Amino acid sequence: MPEIKKLSPRLANQIAAGEVVERPASVIKELVENSVDAGAKQLDVEIESGGVKLMRVRDNGCGIGKNDLPLALSRHATSKIYHLDDLEAVGTLGFRGEALASISSVARLKLTSNDGLQDTAWCAQAEGRDMEAELSPAAHPQGTTVEVRDLFFNTPARRKFLRTEKTEYSRIEDILKRIALSRFELGFSLKNNGKVVHNWRPANSLAEQERRVAQICGPAFMENAVHVDINRTGLRLWGWVALPTFSRSQADLQHFYVNGRAIKDRLVAHAVKQAYQDVLYHGRHPAYVLYLELDPANVDVNVHPTKHEVRFRDGRLVHDFLFSSLHKALADVRPSAEQPVTYQQPSIASLSQQQPVQSALGLAGTSNAASSGAGSYPANSTANYSAAYSPANVGNVSEQINQYSNLTSPTGSPSNLQYTNSSQTPVNDLQEDNAEIPPLGYAIAQLKGIYILAENANGLIVVDMHAAHERITYERLKQQFDHEQLASQPLLVPLSMAVSEKEAALAEESASLFARLGFAVETAGPETILIRQVPVILNRATVEDLVRDVLSDVIEYGTSSRIEHNINEILSTMACHGSVRANRKLTLPEMNSLLRDMEATERSGQCNHGRPTWSQMTLAQLDKLFMRGQ
């Protein structure tokens, strides 16, 4: 057996550098995070040749004293934690004490700092040849400047893995943007090859914060963003989420921070994806800039050397909080006169004071549900639904569904393009009377039997009547289904499933979860479970695969929504078949009824498949189109 020897400090630091210093962007990340932890208010970053030739980070933080400078460049030396208890509740971005030592082992590092307590600043220099820091006096205001030159000069193999100068600069820019989004109270500047590229001033007010987000994520993001600020016991979620219509082909505009630390976590990504699942077009990705604040003791940041991953003490609680908060925020976005929308968690008192509203068709309903719904379903879908699910008050549901029969019936009355209801007032009269115009305005015509044209205070509204009616019907069906007890049916022959011991134990522990969802699951052996009862609406689904997926979700995320998702898919199909079809002539009162229901329905901006249901064209856009005033 080879003799065991202790690694030299230089070799140990280069091994650590393999984890910490992957490329120039990794160096910038570590240095900027150190400046943030030092209490800096302004950070200036300068790079040359994509960071390979020069990287310089200057801050006006607390600085480092002369006696601490040599320690700052040694491994496992830090001012951020001292005891094990500190590690279990880390409140800073850095804490391992490896960054400067790792950087100095693969580059020429110069650290100049002034703590404001001494007459002069001091400079420490170190290179990859040895780990001894050379101290010398220097001139420097309070704060610290770290200068890194010739990255990987002593490790040519590592240097070969670097990309082009443009690519490395782009990654440095992304790192700085990500940190600038996490610390609005700080000012940042970036200079590339002697040219100032970015200069972000401190942003303390909400308007200034939104301006910085628009500068980094693009103005289109802020124009389509909803501001969220939700507090729950020990948890706070705030930031901006983009409307589902502003989806992306890639997950390139997703920023999530936990206590100011940028992370990429599967649990968080799953919770956000679940919140968008009912409104996002297939294959698209949501965009968001979100901040989660919680007790540092409830999150473990010492999971991965890059510190991009965290582990929550109660992952299920965090997952449910993120999902419910974003799901509610997106549901409350309805057509309004002004965008973007700010969503804040309603108080219990305000919820208790909500009164039923009267729909355009005269039916009383809740404020978040459409009171008029689908027309007659095709024979096959109606039969499937009645066989699968029969709520106690199905008569009430049928009564509400029949209110839209005049929209889908082939013998429906043709449109006369006139207001036939005395309660419907033309928009021009409303404008003359200075009356309040609804967000979607009032219908003026129907185009090709597909689109509804309406006039509101801002200009022209175009509505896809089938997509809009589909969402209204779908939301009402979900509410009716949720308010009824989930009907289940026992299986004539229980379904036996072979699972692992871990899955069998989890199925026994999650029996109450399955029972709430209409399943009766019990263990029949160390690696066998029996399914004795299933929801009747899922009687044609592949139950075995569904249960396996649920167990997999519970293992991974602590919860699962796959059963509800399968039920919603069935209701969505019913709503699609039961909605008003193209080439159906509608009267103006019928079109206005649909517009009013859209304003009262959750998620009415998208159909069940994530497509937009309406679009606004302002007078300014129309004037530009026809070059009026030019």
Image: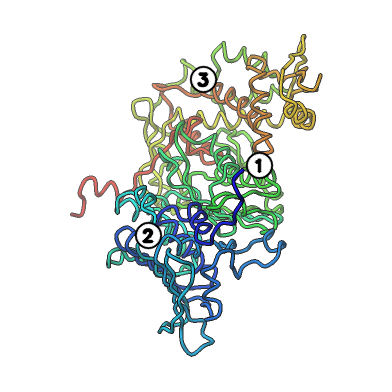
**Residue 381 against residue 474 in the figure, above or below:** above
Tag count in the figure? 3
- Residue for badge 3: 577
**Neighbour tally class for label 1: few under 14, some 14-19, many 20 plus, Cα within 10 Å:** few
Q: Residue furthest top?
A: 492
- The amino acid type, in three-letter code, at marker 3 is His
The CA distance from mark 1 to mark 2 is 67 Å
Whether 557 is drawn above or below 43: the answer is above
Marks 1 and 3: in contact by CB < 8 Å? no
The residue sitting at the bottom extreme is 119
The disc at residue 151 is 2
Residue 241 versus residue 62 in the image, above or below: above
Mark 2–mark 3 contact, CB under 8 Å?
Answer: no
Judging by the rendered image, the residue that carries numbered circle 1 is 356
Q: Nearer the viewer, residue 433 or 472?
A: 472
In the image: residue 370, left or right of residue 314: left
The picture quadrant where one finds residue 45 is: bottom left
**Disc 3 or disc 1, which is closer to the eye?**
3
First in residue order: circle 1 vs circle 2: 2
